[in-house]
Amino acid sequence: MKNNEYHIPVLLHAATDALVLNPNGFYVDVTFGGGGHSKQILDKLDKGRLIAFDQDADASKNVIDDSRFTLVQQNFRHFQNVLNVNGFDCVDGVLADLGVSSHQFNVGERGFSFNHDGLLDMRMNQAGELNAFHVVNNYDEADMIDLFIQFGEFNKGLASKIVNKIISLRNEELINSTQKLAYAVGGLTSFKTRNKFLARVFQAIRIEVNQEMQSLSEMLEQIPNCLNPKGRLVVITYHSLEDRMVKNFIRSGNVKGVLDKDFYGNVNRTLEEVVRKPIVPDEEEIKVNSRARSAKLRIASKKD
């Protein structure tokens, strides 16, 4: 499979230009996927080195044959430990292209998309224990309502209706496919808004299955200890939950956005914004890759 068929890298040049300031530096791509960003990083390096992470075994098919490159099949929440095991304390830049790869969406049996009929799975790590089938068929009402409020950003009333529809159907038969789940809840919205509505339903379950927000939080909290002075953090987000967490961390030093100030009222933080507003794809990129439409690129630099 060609890498651009696996996943078209979003904001490729903006992200890698912001990341690689030292061609002899050491960089980390915590979301390897199809390898598009990693290849561009390597093109910018001379004697530098790149370690990439991806918990999805399918990504290993895209491994890059380059002595400066190492691919680690791990969740990025473990990246500091992996660096330490490999004899490194700090790096010159970390890139994260969050969310789901085009490959994961397009392969129906992975269960990520309501546009393809497949088993309810949604595991980014196919060896993971929790899958969407278990969430949909076994979570109790209160826990399921909570995840749709928290990760789907539905109000409590609509979240309750979604869960009632799911429970009503699962009491009759197991909800074991993406199409059954879409059928169960699709009638709660109009035809015009159905796709956006289902996207949020599937997003909420997927985030729960993969502990995406917890993993992102843990990864970000490791950044101050793993970046060299003036090292860059470059993150591409695709929905408001991710973007809010990244923005909070950059601006306040923690994912909740609570400012920690010293005696004089100065905010204690180790990163500073390189650009105040996030960079977004232009119309030309969105025409080529519609999944870039919601992308936001944030760039931060570690203080001296």
Image: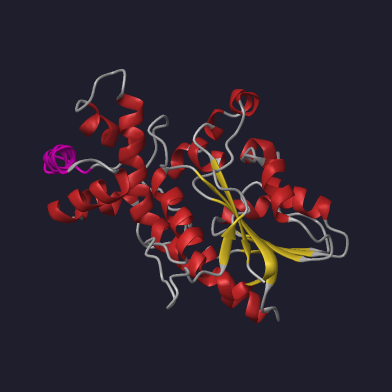
Looking at the rendered image, the quarter that the C terminus falls into is bottom right
Q: Which residues are magenta?
A: 156-174
Viewer-nearest residue: 154 or 102: 154
Report whether residue 1 is seen.
no
Say left or right for 118 vs 83: left
User: In the figure, 10 relative to 97: above or below?
Assistant: above
User: In the figure, 296 relative to 299: above or below?
Assistant: above
> In the orientation shown, which residue stands out farthest toward the front?
264
Looking at the rendered image, the quarter that the N terminus falls into is top right
State the predominant SS element of the stretch in magenta. Answer: helix
Q: Which residue occupies 37% across, 62% down? A: 256
Viewer-nearest residue: 214 or 133: 214
Say left or right for 197 vs 239: left
> In the orientation shown, which residue stands out farthest toward the top?
192
Spot occupied by residue 289 in the image (x, y as percentages of width and height): 60, 29
Q: Which residue occupies 52% across, 50% down? A: 98
Say left or right for 274 vs 239: right
Viewer-nearest residue: 112 or 98: 98
Spot occupied by residue 216 in the image (x, y as percentages of width and height): 46, 60
Spot occupied by residue 112 in the image (x, y as percentages of width and height): 42, 41
Please check the rendered image and state whether residue 157 is part of the magenta-colored stretch, yes or no: yes
